[in-house]
Image (cartoon, coloured by chain):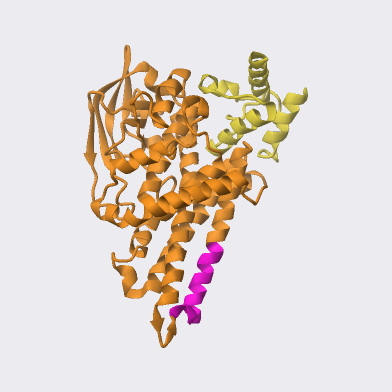
Amino acid sequence: MRLELNPQQRAAREEFRAFVAAEIAPHAGRWDRAAAIPMELVDRLRERGYLGSNVPAEYGGPGRDNVTYGLLTEEIGKGCSSVRSLLTVHDMVAHVIGRWGSQGQRERYLPALAKGDAGRKTIGAFCLSEPNAGSDAKSVETVARDDGDAWVLDGRKKWTTFGQIANLFLVLAQLGEKSDGKPTAFLVERDLPGVTVRPLPGITGTRASMLAEVFFEGCRVPKASLIGKPGFGVSAVMSTALDHGRYSVAWGAVGLAQACLDASRAYAAERRQFGVPIADHQLVRRMLTNMIAEVRAARLLCLRAGWLRDTRDPGATGEIWVAKYFASTMATRAALDAVQIHGANGCSEGFPVERYLRDSRVLEIIEGSTQIQQITIPLFELQEL
Amino acid sequence: MDQTQTKIKEFLSRFFKSHDLQPDEDIFALGFVNSLLAMQLVAFVEKEFGISVGDEDLDLDNFRTINSIARLVARKQGAAA
């Protein structure tokens, strides 16, 4: 395993860092309070090739390697977890289309998900969760009925990140009837009749991720909208999407924790109590030390997972589980300590650590909750014992 | 067993240590396959044999036994040649 970044990766990280410092971090608090990010930012991300990072060059994307993609996600996650969540879900859709899409689907959607194709700029969103189905993906209640030249979708999706502005939904539905047990994935364009989007406000963290409920009511989608094969919606399509999502969230968690550390270190050096900076108090220093060590450990796990992905190693999926589990739980610990170091200020929206703590909660729930990871990671280890 | 079958058996045996997997034995029927192993298996055949598994190959029968996986590999390698 390579532990060092190559010169191109180091240069890319500097570019990402400068962009986030100038165009994301200063505004993240305002976007959080507004519960939205501006469309101009989405355009800027697209112009710079930060959306659809994993789209191959032959389809108009930058085709970034997985480590560089991780560095981008860390830096964006350091500035704003909501913007990071846009990259996560958008790239999950792009990743799935690149992996399991037909030639026609790849040609139709990948250029539009990357740079934008002839003015057609697509934002992808991931429609798995429902009011009664989340971790148990195979139990979704949305159905897709065969009706001659089309599939007809009926159902309701919840917690769809950036569903408010997305125009391409990756949807999991049961083929036929729920009892058939054939979860199948579809690519559904937003402007089709029968698609309705309703904003879902009031979320605790990643408040600017523009969540929505998406309703499908007698929605006729072309037969060519099915992605993968019937019955492979979970085992192939959604598993592939979530694999990428976990990788992205793991790096985003490293970024969030690094932001907690940066804010805490600066505050502890400046804030004085008992005649000295609070960084001189041993119990504060202990919290900083834990953050420093854990951020580094999580970053190394992410680098290892990225290296395994880049070398197409079969062990990559399991290592991503470990990286996501450690990084997301670590981010919560870092955010809790960051608020503690800031005292009452940490509970005020005048300081970003208050937002970091709210955002950290989300990271332990999305793309496989902490508890799902705790169930699955031992299986991964036991497999090869 | 030829080299392809042997490599497939070696890979799967990492997960079925207590079982001597036979070339035509149904790995799904044995109950050992979960979604993680399914993804690892696809990644393994792609990397080990230099092929690309696409949506047209998503058929459980392609992955059911050592022999069926070997046939998939031979078919994909033949198509690429």
Residue name at image x 77 percent, y 25 percent: B3
Relative side of A130 to B50, left or right: left
Q: Is residue A16 above or below residue A121?
A: below
Locate residue A160: give its quadrant.
top left
Does A89 lie within the magenta span?
Answer: no
Residue A213 rendering spot, x and y as whole percentages: 26, 39
Relative side of A133 to B79, left or right: left
Q: Which chain is yellow?
A: B
- Looking at this view, name the residue that lies furthest to the bottom: A274
Residue A77 rendering spot, x and y as whole percentages: 43, 52
- Looking at this view, name the residue that lies furthest to the top: A148
Relative side of A343 to B27, left or right: left
Q: Is residue A342 above or below residue A217?
A: below
Locate residue A338: give its quadrant.
bottom left
Task: Specify whether residue A28 is in view.
Answer: no
Q: Where does the magenta region start and end? A: A278-294
Main SS of the magenta part reads helix
Residue A169 rendering spot, x and y as whole percentages: 34, 31
**Which sits in the foreground, A3 or B48?**
A3
Does A286 lie within the magenta span?
Answer: yes
Residue name at image x 42 percent, y 26 percent: A111
Residue name at image x 43 percent, y 63 percent: A260
Residue name at image x 53 percent, y 70 percent: A289
**Which sits in the foreground, A367 or B23?**
A367
Q: Is residue A107 above or below residue A93?
A: above
How many marks are shown on the rendered structure?
0
State the hue of chain A: orange
Residue A294 rendering spot, x and y as whole percentages: 54, 62
